[in-house]
């Protein structure tokens, strides 16, 4: 039996509940965002917007508030429409929790964006744009936010972007960059009874694996926050049979680097660690995503931190704040979804946490966001 009981039953709380359930009832696994994009477009197009919605593929830019002739700060609230492909039952709310694919990551954030659009009216103390985009849960180059930022005439000029990735209503500042590297070792097959007749590709990787085994995280203290540079083996594949000396062995390394490290510097550091010249390995760098500085001292970020957030932390993972940062636009992560529920089977999130996130952003946008 479905229950939508919340401790706080204000109209806004009910709207948050109903909107989150509505979003979770529309499947939107990565690559299949058209239906949810159409639905969000139809719902928001009914509002008295500052300008028509702009659509790019299955992504939307919604000009919500424009007043003051450019004298007020311009904020973008940003959220992705897609979810990972995982196992979930029907969308439902039970015992104060919403269940469904993307409930935490990040339809909770989308629900807050939509209800803010429907309730703010003239109260916002800043110009406000909403961005709903597709294909976040895949490779960097396939993410539709990249083309949206490249094509949209306004987004690169906003004063602050807030990405509503799940953060339990904590303010997550900056983000680490990420590089994946495919490292392939070559050898020669032979019968495993006569290994001297072959060349073992797997054992060629031993020096790199030894280096990685003792590699400690490198700490970076930036604007009062601690970030860590790490390199991790995430995949390994090799061998043709249990009695054959392997002639190929492939590793995937994921290199995460701190916000004060450029993408070029990170690539050089990773290649030096791999030391392909010494082993004859072939290295392909893939899915390269830059880091983003935290902007901890930005007045509008400070105002958001003071609007009721549950604390401020460094973002050790990568998020799309880096895309804004690369354009010179300060950006932060703040979302009401439960971070630990992201990408989980039977994903869910606490509805009261989502309503709390709505209230924090409502307070910030109507009372404190105007401070530059």
Image (cartoon, rainbow, N blue to C red):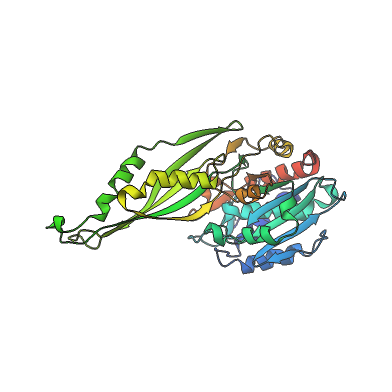
In-image side of 174 versus 191 (left or right): right
Residue 173: image quadrant is top right
Q: Residue placed at 32% from the left, 53% from the top?
A: 280
Residue 103 appearing in the image: yes
The one of 96 and 299 positioned closer to us in this rendering = 299
Q: Residue placed at 63% from the left, 36% from the top?
A: 310
Q: Residue placed at 18% from the left, 58% from the top?
A: 198
In-image side of 242 versus 155 (left or right): left
Q: Position of residue 200 (x, y in %)?
A: 23, 55
The one of 272 and 172 positioned closer to us in this rendering = 272
Q: In which quarter of the image is the N terminus?
A: bottom right
Looking at the image, residue 38 lies above or below residue 12: below
Residue 17 appearing in the image: no
The one of 370 and 18 positioned closer to us in this rendering = 370
Q: Where is residue 148 in the image (x, y as percent from the top left)?
A: 67, 60
Q: In which quarter of the image is the C terminus?
A: top right
In the rendered image, the residue lying farthest to the left is 193
Q: Where is residue 359 in the image (x, y as percent from the top left)?
A: 72, 44
In the rendered image, the residue lying farthest to the right is 68
Q: Where is residue 111 in the image (x, y as percent from the top left)?
A: 67, 54
């Amino acid at each position: 039996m479905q229950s939508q009981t919340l401790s706080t039953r204000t109209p806004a709380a009910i709207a948050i509940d109903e909107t989150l359930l509505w979003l979770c009832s529309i499947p939107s696994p990565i690559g299949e965002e058209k239906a949810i994009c159409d639905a969000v477009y139809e719902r928001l197009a009914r509002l008295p917007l500052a300008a028509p919605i702009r659509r790019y593929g299955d992504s939307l830019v919604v000009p919500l508030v424009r007043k003051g002739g450019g004298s007020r700060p311009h904020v973008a609230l940003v959220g992705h429409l897609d979810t990972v492909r995982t196992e979930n039952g029907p969308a439902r709310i039970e015992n104060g929790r919403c269940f469904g694919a993307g409930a935490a990551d990040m339809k909770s954030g989308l629900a807050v964006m939509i209800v803010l659009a429907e309730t703010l009216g003239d109260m916002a103390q800043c110009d406000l744009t909403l961005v709903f985009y597709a294909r976040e849960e895949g490779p960097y180059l396939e993410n539709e936010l990249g083309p949206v930022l490249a094509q949209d005439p306004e987004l690169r000029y906003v004063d602050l972007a807030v990405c509503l990735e799940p953060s339990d209503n904590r303010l997550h500042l900056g983000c680490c960059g990420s590089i994946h590297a495919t490292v392939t070792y070559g050898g020669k097959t032979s019968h495993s009874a006569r290994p001297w007749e072959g060349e073992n590709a797997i054992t060629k990787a031993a020096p790199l694996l030894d280096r990685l085994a003792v590699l400690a995280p490198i700490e970076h203290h930036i604007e009062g926050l601690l970030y860590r540079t790490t390199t991790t083996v995430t995949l390994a594949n090799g061998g043709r049979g249990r009695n054959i000396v392997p002639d190929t062995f492939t590793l995937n390394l994921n290199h995460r680097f701190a916000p004060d490290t450029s993408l070029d510097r990170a690539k050089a550091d990773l290649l030096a660690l791999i030391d392909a010249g010494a082993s004859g390995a072939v290295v392909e760098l893939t899915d390269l995503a830059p880091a983003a500085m935290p902007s901890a001292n930005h007045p509008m970020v400070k105002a958001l931190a003071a609007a009721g957030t549950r604390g401020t932390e460094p973002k050790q993972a990568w998020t799309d704040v880096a895309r804004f940062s690369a354009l010179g636009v300060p950006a932060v992560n703040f979302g009401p979804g439960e971070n630990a529920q992201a990408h989980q089977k039977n994903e869910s999130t606490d509805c009261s946490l989502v309503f709390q996130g709505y209230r924090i952003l409502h307070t910030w946008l109507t009372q404190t966001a105007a401070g530059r």
